[in-house]
């Protein structure tokens, strides 16, 4: 894979919308924070020091490739990419916003399916991450763990007997592991249960984002749940805990959906079909409005109220209609209005070309497949 | 008036935010206001804890000051960072800082994680005999359990394995180079 392809391909594996509980769990992510021993952490490194870290990681990466490993992976100098391309990497969740803004030497190791990647010189020297569709935390952990093992063969990591992996921020010390899931919980919102469920999740030692604060609605009913504690538990315990809580949330959401379908079917059908109607016809579409309508559409697909030929379409649209990606498709920067117009036309085309119009009569008991 | 965020486009909206418990008002252009309110989904979660950390540390630091420590500030020989810098940034300068500021950090680490002992993965190569030590600990726990359920066959096997591991450590390392202060 050539470096430019890292930004060009929309089809990261998580976009496929497959995997266990994929109707509710959009993706599972594992992130491991690692640092080189002795070397100061990135935020105190000079440009030369940061360059040295990038070189050492690149050398390790090339040594592994020379042994015939990590063959599909590429080493990308993020700091040498134009800002727009960096932003695309952010929207594809390959790098963090902080990493994209860094003016010191930075790099990314990634594969064509964009499942396992490594950020170099983010908050820590190395941030290994694995992103998979559906609820697949164990598999994501296995893949990130394998990448960690491979890199550790060539690089000395900062590790203390008592505190484990030493990280720039003490909130990550120990395992350096942050496991998270992205959940689509529209029915919990519609039935006003989200806050209650959120409190329960926090009590179980997990963090939930997307519930409070501005823009919550506009996020398209997406919530991120992750572990807070990284020290004093094994990786397996952390992942088991998150997995268990996620399954509980999935069952709560499923029950709420059943309730809505039995008590408020007409309203839900109306909502879903209105979303389709707007997406298929609107001429100006902001990214926030799109996210909310995608959420409605997704709910409709999950509840069998309307059918898209490819489930993937929804996740793809979610990526390609983000501001920077849209601009990359357009081949340059766009004014906000131009962007909203282009987003609307991209959505219209995608729905028309790849998907059937919605089927079914309101309130009817259609069993169309 | 120009947008206080990008300082390029004219400000058209007033955005009220709560930052560190303080109400902050900003005048922004439509573009930046939208960005501000758009939570990035799927990116690495920056925990509220990390933001809380500043306050947590400030408190600890203030306590130290009250105790009347007038000695010159300790700095890390590895990176030159001081504890004060850490309280301001919420990030340490290098892995050595964990040793240098161990006493100051321990209560805070306990408060964040509820523990100060790593139980997870040990790197295969860098970990050296830490990996063996961990295997010993795991076996000792298993041994206790085996004894408790009167499974003496397993207990005997585990005891032999622990002895083997102890020998490995003794042979491999005569002198312990404790990288991390007690």
Image (cartoon, rainbow, N blue to C red):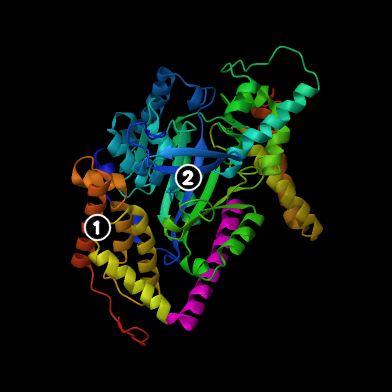
- Give the x, y percent position of residue B86: 61, 26
Q: Which mark is residue B44?
A: 2
In front of the other: A232 or A217: A217
Q: Work out whether disc 2 and disc 1 sit on a shared chain.
A: no
Q: Residue at x 51, y 78 (%)?
A: A259
In front of the other: A237 or B140: A237
Could you say which quadrant of the image residue B50 lies in? top right
Task: Identify the residue position indicated by label 1 in the image.
Answer: A344
Q: Residue at x 36, y 38 (%)?
A: A109
Residue A64 visible here:
no
Q: A183 above or below A302? A: above
Q: Which residues make up the magenta segment?
A: A236-265
- Tell whether position A34 is magenta: no
Q: Quarter of the image containing the C terminus of chain B?
A: top right
Q: Is residue B101 left or right of residue A332?
A: right
- Give the x, y percent position of residue A16: 33, 60
Q: What is the chief secondary structure element of the magenta stretch?
A: helix
- Give the x, y percent position of residue A207: 58, 51
Q: Residue at x 24, y 74 (%)?
A: A357
Q: Residue at x 59, y 59 (%)?
A: A198
For mark 2, does the 10 Å Cα neighbourhood hold few (<14), some (14 to 19), or many (20 or more) residues? many
Per the model, the C-alpha gap separating discs 2 and 1 is: 29 Å
Residue A169 visible here:
yes
Q: A14 above or below A265? A: above
């Amino acid at each position: 894979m050539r470096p430019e392809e890292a930004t060009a391909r929309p089809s990261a594996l998580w976009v496929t919308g497959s995997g266990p509980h994929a109707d509710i769990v959009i993706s599972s992510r594992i992130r491991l924070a690692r640092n080189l021993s002795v070397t100061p952490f990135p935020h105190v490194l000079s440009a030369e020091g940061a360059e040295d870290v990038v070189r050492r990681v690149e050398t390790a990466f090339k040594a592994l490739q020379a042994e015939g490993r990590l063959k599909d992976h590429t080493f990308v100098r993020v700091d040498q990419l134009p800002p727009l391309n960096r932003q695309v990497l952010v929207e594809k969740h390959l790098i963090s916003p902080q990493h994209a803004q860094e003016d010191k030497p930075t790099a990314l190791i990634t594969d064509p399916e964009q499942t396992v990647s490594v950020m170099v010189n983010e908050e820590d020297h190395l941030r290994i991450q694995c992103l998979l569709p559906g609820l697949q935390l164990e598999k994501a952990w296995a893949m990130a763990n394998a990448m960690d093992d491979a890199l550790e063969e060539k690089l000395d990591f900062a590790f203390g007997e008592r505190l484990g992996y030493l990280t720039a921020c003490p909130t990550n010390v120990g395992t350096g592991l942050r496991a998270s899931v992205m959940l689509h919980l529209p029915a919990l919102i519609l039935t006003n249960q989200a806050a209650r469920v959120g409190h329960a999740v926090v009590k179980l030692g997990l963090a939930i984002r997307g519930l409070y604060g501005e823009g919550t609605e506009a996020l398209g009913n997406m919530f991120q749940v992750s572990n807070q504690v990284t020290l004093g538990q094994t990786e397996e315990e952390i992942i088991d805990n998150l997995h268990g809580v996620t399954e509980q949330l999935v069952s709560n959401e499923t029950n709420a959906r059943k309730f809505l379908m039995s008590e408020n079917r007409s309203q839900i059908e109306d909502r879903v079909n209105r979303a389709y109607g707007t997406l298929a016809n609107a001429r100006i579409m902001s990214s926030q409005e799109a996210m909310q309508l995608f959420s409605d559409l997704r709910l409709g697909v999950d509840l069998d109220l309307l059918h898209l030929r490819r489930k993937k379409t929804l996740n793809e649209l979610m990526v390609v209609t983000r501001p920077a990606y849209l601009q990359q498709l357009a081949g340059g920067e766009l004014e906000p209005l131009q962007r909203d117009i282009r987003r609307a036309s991209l959505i219209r085309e995608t729905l028309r070309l790849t998907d059937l119009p919605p089927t079914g009569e309101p309130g009817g008991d259609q069993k169309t497949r | 008036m120009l947008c206080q965020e990008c300082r390029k486009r004219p400000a058209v909206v007033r955005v009220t935010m709560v930052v560190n418990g303080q109400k902050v008002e900003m005048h922004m252009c439509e573009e930046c206001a939208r960005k501000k309110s758009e939570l990035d989904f799927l990116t690495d979660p920056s925990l509220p804890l990390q933001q809380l950390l500043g306050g947590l540390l400030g408190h600890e630091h203030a306590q130290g000051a009250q105790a009347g420590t007038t000695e010159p500030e300790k700095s890390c020989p590895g990176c030159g960072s001081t504890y004060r810098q850490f309280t301001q940034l919420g990030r340490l300068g290098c892995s050595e800082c964990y040793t240098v500021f161990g006493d100051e950090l321990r209560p805070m680490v306990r408060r964040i994680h509820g523990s100060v002992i790593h139980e997870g993965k040990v790197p295969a190569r860098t970990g050296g005999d830490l990996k063996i030590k961990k295997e010993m600990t795991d076996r000792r726990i298993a041994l206790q359990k085996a004894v408790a359920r009167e499974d003496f066959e397993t207990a005997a096997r585990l005891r032999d394995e622990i002895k083997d591991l102890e020998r490995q450590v003794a042979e491999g390392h005569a002198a312990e180079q404790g990288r991390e202060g007690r």
